[in-house]
Amino acid sequence: MYFESLSDFIAMGGHAKYVWSSYLIALFIFILNLVLPVMARQRFFNNQSRRLRRETSARNVKIENEGHDASGS
Amino acid sequence: MWTWFYRLGSPKWFYGISGRWLPWFLCAAMVLLVTGSVWGLAFAPQDYQQGNSFRIIYIHVPTAFLAQSCYFIMAVCGAIGLIWKMKLSDMVAKSCAPIGASFTFLALVTGAIWGKPTWGTWWVWDARLTSMLVLLFLYLGVIALQSAISDRNQAAKASAVLSLVGLVNIPIIKYSVEWWNTLHQPASFSVVAKPTMPIEMWMPLLIMVIGLYCFFAALLVMRIRVEILEREWRTEWVKALIKKR
Amino acid sequence: MSFSKLFMATLKRDMTIAFRHPSDLVNPLIFFLVVVSLFPLAISPDARYLAEIAPGVLWVASLLATLLSLDMLFQSDYQDGTLEQLLLSPQPLYTSVLAKVVSHWLLSGLPLALISPLLALMLFLPSSAMPTLMITLLLGTPIMSFIGAIGAALTIGLRKTGLLLSLIVLPLYIPILIFAASAVQNAAIGLPVLGHLALLGALLVLSVVLAPLAIAAALRISLGS
């Protein structure tokens, strides 16, 4: 360990705000880059499953109607 | 050997194999980045002249390095997509752009923050920072062009041409900015510490660079997978994936 | 059709069409004049100060004026379908593109270079720097036309092309700006400029040879053929 104590480590010899802000901004950007594709993937699956549900229900309605027509006429 | 190359053209194959590799890339990246940062922050000695603010190098240099490599990869993949019409190559190029832009931004911000205790101002028009700023402009141009064109294939081809034109221009821009800088600076400072860095200083740097490359690979794979899903939403294997969820 | 015949035919056609709307040709020049006038108004009319920033201001203004003139390259031909015909014709696209960019330069860059001494006077540029200013503009504006044409070809038919085009093309203009502005600055204080001009000349040769390839590829991509 280069520093004498934890408070020395945090203080960074007076340059604390520069070093820590850099590392924190870096962390933020890294996390952002991780989160955005995950959210996009989630969005894709949500949209697609909603669309599939819509299509299957539309198809079911169509089949029901044809069944009614067949039995009715 | 060429079967590997042609298999690479199949999005489904890539999706499958990348799913298995992704956790490894992420783990490796996490381990390396954490090790490198902790080593650089807590264990490496401080610089004789710059004191502890020198530790910013462990973020600034790897991100700057990757920002440039990323542009190169983007341009080369764009060229492969143009010449061999390989869709996967187009997808790699498209995914590189936002990652590269954010790394360039990070390199600029850390460079600026480093400048304050070193030179007293928040921004210096030194050759490296200015070239990095122009690189950011080039990235933003490619991203803007891609989002402006609605047809996916046309967007991929157009941004491939633009990134290739940018690639040819990058050496010219770097040379002109360095030359411009020597005109206006009495002594040329380097944002990087002197090249004769002791091993305790450059080992964590090396670890950070490798770790960031692994992280970049992981991010790229994540984005490509989403891109594959969006493009291939009509196929059976994607429908099966949706039903499974 | 031989190279020179095709080149001259395309050149003549573009120039004839452009002269039917003379106001379009004058607009970039007026823009140049207005932008240059903004600087003394915004900063200071002090002769010494203006003389110092004159090379940079004149070059930034001509950069912006060229950017604005770029949409006259392909827009009207795209809208009436001529561009598509050009791509379908058996004539080599390289030659037609070369001729189009040269005619664009003759209509925008060349007049810009010719009226620059007038504007240099307004900014108190020393007369020793005037010839260098004109030469840098004569060398630099064709480079800007060629590189700008790549951007214009990539953004044909898109919405809000003006801003997108500027964002794409301006970073590529930076080397021209650096070499040209410092050449004029050197001339103003009596230092040699031959190296700068040689570099600009090299960039010009490079863009004349390579840019039409990129422009032709971009046209094919944008028009979907």
Image (cartoon, coloured by chain):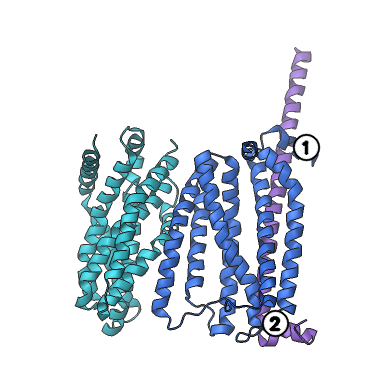
Q: Are marks 2 and 1 on the same chain?
A: yes
Label 1: chain letter = B
- Find chain A in the image and tell me its colour: purple
Counting from the top left corner in percent of width and height, residue B179 is at: 40, 72
SS at mark 1 in the image: helix
Give the distance between the C-alpha atoms of the residues marked 2 and 1, in whole angstroms. 55 Å
Which mark identifies residue B45?
2
Report x, y in % for residue C71: 34, 51
Q: Secondary structure at mark 2?
A: loop
* Quarter of the image where one finds residue C32: bottom left
Quarter of the image for residue C128 reads bottom left
The blue-tinted chain is B
User: The residue under label 2 is which amino acid type?
Assistant: Pro
Question: Which comes before the other along the chain, label 2 or label 1?
Answer: 2
Left of C117 or right of it: where is B100? right
Circle 1 residue = B243
Which residue is depicted at the point 43% across and 42% down? Answer: C222
Q: Nearer the viewer, residue B21 or B158?
A: B21
